[in-house]
Image (tube, rainbow, N blue to C red):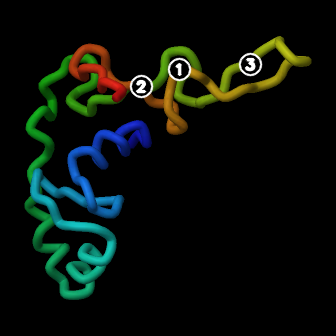
Amino acid sequence: MDPGHLPELAALLPRVALPQVFVGGRHLGGADEVRRLHESGELRRIVAPAPGPAFSGSCARCGGERYLLCGACDGSHKRYSLKGGGGFRACAECNENGLVRCPACCVPVPVA
């Protein structure tokens, strides 16, 4: 949901090509492995009974989703600015999906 997680994921999975797919905490692999699982019909079996995240529903603010719509742009990722002749600019508060991490249940990711 947020490309800001790529460095964190890359640090956890050195020498592994991204993206990597996880279902219910189980590592399935990269795109080639997931494609093979899909073609063999195995992916449907793996995904169907997958439980939700362990934190699901535990946060009253985000409902366990860990992200909220940006309060600055209401999730549009655009803000009107009078600077430079006026017009819409990308919101600096959220990611490109108009989401921010839930401050109630997500700890900030340290930048190395």
**What amino acid does circle 2 point to?**
Val
Q: Residues within 10 Å of mark 3 (few under 14, many from 20)?
A: few
Q: Residues within 10 Å of mark 2 (few under 14, many from 20)?
A: some
Which mark is first along the chain, 2 or 3?
Answer: 3
Up-down relation of residue 61 to residue 3 (above or below): above
Q: Which residue is mark 3?
A: 80
Residue 20 horizontal/vertical position (percent):
28, 60
Marks 3 and 1: CB-CB under 8 Å?
A: no
Label 3: which secondary element:
strand
Marks 2 and 1: CB-CB under 8 Å?
A: yes
Residue 63 horizontal/vertical position (percent):
23, 27
Which mark is first along the chain, 1 or 3?
Answer: 3
Q: Residues within 10 Å of mark 1 (few under 14, many from 20)?
A: some
Which residue sits at x=28%, y=24%?
62
**What amino acid does circle 3 point to?**
Tyr
Q: Which residue is mark 2?
A: 100
Which residue sits at x=20%, y=79%?
37
Q: Residue furthest right?
A: 85
Would residue 97 be found to the left or right of residue 62 on screen?
right
Up-down relation of residue 4 to residue 27 (above or below): above
Which residue sits at x=14%, y=60%?
27
Mark number displayed over residue 93: 1
